[in-house]
Structure formats: C-alpha cells, structure tokens
Amino acid sequence: MMYSEEEIKLILKESNEDIKLKKYLDKIKKIFGDDYAVLILSCDYDIVKSINKFTSKISNINSTHIQFLLLQAALLSNNNYYKRLIEEKIEESDYEGLFPFISSNILFRKELVRLFIEQSDKNNYDIFNKKEFEEKDKIINNIKELKTYERFLRVQKEMDDNFYIKRKRRR
C-alpha cells in the first residue's frame, strides 16, 4: 500500500462540523426516515440554504465542502455506479464539471445524499477499512484529488470575496 496508516487517518479525518452534520442527518433519518433526511440537503439549489431551512446548528460549513463530503461518501460506498462515475470524472480531471453538477442536478445530489446518509452512523476510517485491499489506494488517491480541488475552490472564493470587498470600499 502506498500510504501509511497515519496518512490515511489524516486524509479521512472528519472535522467537528462534518461530524455534526453526520450526527444530525443520522438522527433525522432515525426519527423521520431517509426521504426527509435527503430533503434537508436537497430542497434548495444552494446546499447551505437548504440546511439552514431546517437547522442553525450547522453553520460553519460551506456548499463546496458539503459537495466534497458527498463525493467522498460515494467513493467510500458500495454503490459501484456512482463510484465509477466519480472516478471517471477524476481520471479526466473534470472537477469543474463534477462540483457544479451536484448543485445543478438535484436528482444526482439526492442519490449522493442517500449514500452519505447510509454512512452517517460510521466514521470514514471505519468505512474505509472494510474495503478490499486493491481498492484502497485508488480510493485514497481520489479523495486526495477531490480534497485538493475543494481547497482550491475555497481559496478562490475567499480571494473573490476579498476582491469584491476591496473594490466596494474604493467607491
């Protein structure tokens, strides 16, 4: 295997907001069912606006990061259709098509949300350890690629926001 256990744990590490989101969706799933839990992340084109319609407890998370979490969950899942679809986009380096597609295609997002909710009661490292040995390196590589692109989008948005604020001050 290309990665040490420590590197894998670091790559699959979940933030406090990620854990809050997972716990919240798991709780909603147990109380109201899968369909209602899926609705929480898919009733609005903007994922954060969608969540904010249901709770204010998860506020420090942005849409791009949630999109990354959904893609990561699909890669860790046993759903070969979505896993292969995402892997093909990553191999083609078509991140620009993948992230916006989650926002624009609600049906695709709903399926990714279902995969995320199915895994919401487990942490990423435990899910990963149940995978076949040959598959592990590919999953970690793909998650690293997505994480890098998600970080790029976040920095780009921060720079755009700062530029807009500076420009607004000059007027």
Image (cartoon, rainbow, N blue to C red):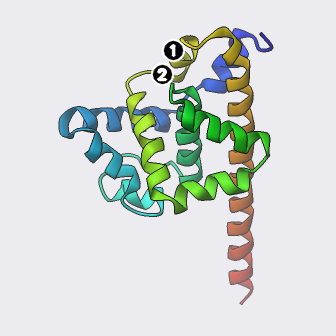
Q: Secondary structure at mark 1?
A: helix
Disc number for residue 109: none
Q: Which residue extends farthest bottom? A: 171
Q: Residue at x 40, y 55 (%)?
A: 42
Residue furthest toward the front?
81
Tag 2–tag 1 contact (CB < 8 Å): yes
Where residue 116 appears, x then y in whole percent? Answer: 45, 35
Q: At label 2, which amino acid type do we have?
A: Asn
How many residues crowd around disc 1 within 10 Å: few (fewer than 14), some, or many (20 or more)? few
Image: 13 above or below 152? above
In the image, farthest residue toward the left: 31
**Quadrant of the image occupied by residue 136:** top right
Q: Is residue 26 above or below residue 126?
A: below
Question: Residue 134's image quarter?
Answer: top right
Amino acid type for the residue under numbered disc 1: Asp
Q: Which residue is mark 1?
A: 126
Q: Which mark is residue 123?
A: 2
Residue at image position (57%, 17%) is 128
In the rendered image, which quarter contains the C terminus? bottom right
Q: Is residue 80 above or below residue 39?
A: above
Rendered location of residue 127, percent (x, y): 51, 18
Question: What residue appears at the point 40 percent right and 46 percent down from the top-left corner?
Answer: 58
In this picture, residue 124 sits left or right of residue 84: left
Decide if residue 115 is on the left or right side of residue 74: left
Question: Can residue 72 be seen at all in this image of the molecule?
Answer: no
Label 2: element kind: loop
Query: Foreground residue, 81 or 141?
Result: 81
Residue at horizontal 19 percent and vertical 40 percent from the top: 32
Q: CA distance from mark 2 to mark 1?
A: 6 Å
